[in-house]
Amino acid sequence: MIQNLKALIVVLTLSLTVFALAKPLCLRFTLPADFARRRALWITLTVAGFILPSFWLFTLLAVPLLFWSGRKDSNPLALCLLLMHVIPPIEVPIPAIGVNRLFSLDMYRLLSLAVLLPAAINLRRAAKSSDERHSKVLELLLWGYGALQILLFVRPDIPHPFLLHDSYTNVLRRAFLFVIDAYLLYYVASRGTSDRRLMTDSLATFLLACLILAPMAIFEGLKPWALYGGVGSTWGGLFSAHYSFRSGALRSVVSTGHSLALGYLLAVGFGLWLCFRKYVDSKLHRSAIPLALSLGLLFAYSRGPWAGAFLIYLTFAFVGPRGYSRLMKALALSAASVAILLASPLGDRVLKVLPFTGGTSQSTYNIVYREVLAERSLQLVEKHPLLGDQNAYSELSDLRQGEGIIDFVDTYAQVAVFYGLTGLFCFCGFMLFALLKVYRAEKALQQKDPDLALVGASLVAGMVGTLFMLSTCSFIFGYAQMFYILGGLAAAYLKLSRKRLEDSTSLPTARVGAPLLGV
């Protein structure tokens, strides 16, 4: 308990400092009442997560507050983006009488049920009196992938999985979980952010959430001390915040559940910073924010997010005006930054993490494991190309690692193995279709509305980075949440850009930040 209180003091000190420093920037995009309410709720739930001995006590406090805040907030999606990782994603099974199990609850599902579900109901009621067009292709692809998850029973990675059989109850459970875990995220993002202010508020709030995580990640890496390592240790659920080392260095996790998830979130947050940096007047902030995000990403010691952040940076430079010249400048700046990093005291740590450059045998083993898993996955897909093999865990049992699991470190392989090429088409098509449409809209807006085109460029960069980083990690934690949210934001951006292109009147661009805000 004493250790938890010490960690809580550090977390509150760092987070309150970020809230104070980021407030002037946030209020350019967020209503003051929303900012104050979200900040108070973040602090309250953080304190509760550290001191309450039971997840159900935490739920008893959190659900009414989330429901009330969601109804008060002008942008429920932004509220969720800030609170997604207020505590680690610890799954606690719901106790049930008369059935083996219902499902587990975690912070993601609490937000879906208490904030997004009421918001979706309100948006649905408003949509009945509106003639807004929505992307039917995106919804068909999303529901296509969802239908495969609902109808196909994937036997879990446990001993004697063939003793388990599917049932109507399981089908209903999977349908319910797909709605709250995936479709609600997409629905609220696509319907609830098609207004200019709500779109930028959502993106700025996610950037704020990343800025809160970044200094904690730096602290964990330097100390080393997993600040959220004791949260939920008595809750009786799947304990997600843990100590993980690579080449002798602690991999920062903070409250994201895994260092890969932390790296992914900070990489996407860095892409959003590229959009908002022109609205920051302070030279100190313009230097401190990208430095904090970069160092937080560095201390996650996750190679996939490192490469993903680099790709996001290059993509953002390329899709904007004068793409080729900006890309060359970005490459030159990246090379200089890498040279400075390698020459710094952190250079040896970085080289030890990379395989074949002084990295440990564990790093080389991870690469070999990925290659073997990819080869075996391809063999399974060739045997069951259309709908996959739902018993694949048994076929891959010889690849079980020391932790006792078969670690699918490639989301695309995971989807193809269990749901076949049909599932892979729906899964990848959902993001690729959104990416291409947003890219075309962003190009069309560059002359007419360059500020809105910046938003599109950051979404394109985030989706490109996400598609790449999914090849280096399982579909877990922040990866899964942001996959559906980015798809929804893309759908909302398409509606927003369509309205803007249909408007013959050009917005003024004289006042810094004015056309982007809409406040």
Image (cartoon, rainbow, N blue to C red):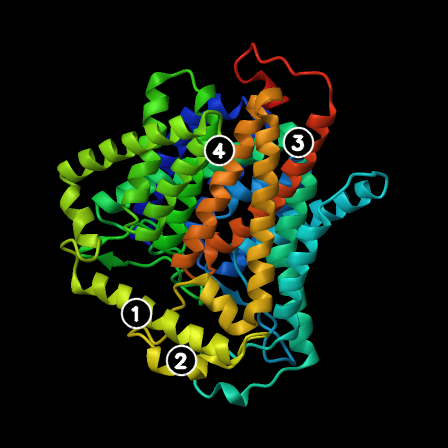
Q: Secondary structure at mark 1?
A: helix
Real-space CA distance between mark 2 and mark 1, rounded to the nearest whole angstrom: 12 Å
Foreground label between 4 and 1? 4
Q: Looking at the picture, how far across and down is residue 479, in whole percent?
A: 47, 53
Element at label 2? loop
* Residue located 59% across and 74% down the image: 386
Q: Which residue is mark 3?
A: 497
- Give the alpha-carbon distance from disc 3 to disc 1, as whole Å: 44 Å
The reply, left or right, for residue 176 in relation to residue 251 is: right
Q: Amino acid at mark 4?
A: Val
Closest to the camera, between mark 2 and mark 4, is 4
Q: Which residue is mark 4?
A: 319
Mark earlier in primary sequence (2, 1) = 1
Q: Tell me how far mark 4 sits from mark 1, CA to CA.
A: 35 Å
The residues tagged by marks 3 and 4 sit, at their Cα atoms, a distance apart of 16 Å
Q: Earlier in the sequence, mark 4 or mark 1?
A: 4
Q: Secondary structure at mark 3?
A: helix
Q: Which mark is residue 396?
A: 2
Q: Quadrant of residue 361?
A: bottom left
Across and down, in percent, residue 199 comes to 61, 33
Of the residues shown, which amino acid type is indicated by label 1?
Tyr
Give the mark nearest the N terminus, 3 or 4.
Answer: 4
Observer-nearest of 507 and 198: 507
